[in-house]
Image (tube, rainbow, N blue to C red):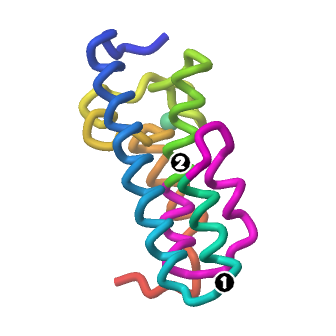
Amino acid sequence: MSTLSAHQLQHCKQSLEERFRQLREEIRQELLNSEDPDYQQLATTVHDTEEESVADLLLDLNLADIDRHVKEIRQVEAAQNRIEAGNYGICIDCGVAIPPPRLEANPAAARCIGCQTLYERQYAQPGHASL
Ligand SMILES: [Zn+2]
């Protein structure tokens, strides 16, 4: 059971939709700027798609800048799927309710703070500089 009120859930849903549109537009711009005709073609597809998963369309891309946005859009899509499934706001690792303020600050959050910290520690990329 989520501790989010219907109003909070609605708010998170709207934030996710907005973020999704923003990310899709950023990805489209990056594809257009790539100077690769294949990517420019893909930009049109990304723009036109409503039903398909944008993340799936972009699965095979290998552009670092876009990759960052694809990762985020995938998190947004996953959160939207959890809303559909009725288990939004529940930590996907430990099953506790994620505090509503965390969800309002980061509507795509899939984990409680404790699990997120563990997850990031576990999957931190060795190649990435961490200060
Ligand atoms: Zn957790």
Point out residue 107 in the picture as x, y percentages from the top left corner.
Answer: 37, 38
Give the amino acid type for the residue marked by disc 1 in the picture.
Pro
Determine if the magenta segment contains residue 58.
yes
The residue to which callout 1 is attached is: 37
Q: Quadrant of residue 78?
A: top right
Instruction: Tell me what residue is drawn at x 36 percent, y 14 percent.
Output: 3
Dot 2 or dot 1, earlier in sequence: 1
Q: Which of marks 2 and 1 is in front?
A: 1
124, 26: nearer the viewer: 26
Q: Quadrant of residue 7?
A: top left
- Dot 2 falls on a residue whose secondary structure is helix
Residue at 28% x, 19% y: name it.
8
Mark 1, secondary structure of its residue: helix
- Residue 65, percent across and down? 49, 78
Amino acid residing under circle 2: Gln
- Residue beneath disc 2: 75
Residue at 52% from the left image edge and 23% from the top image edge: 83
Range covered by the magenta-colored residues: 48-72
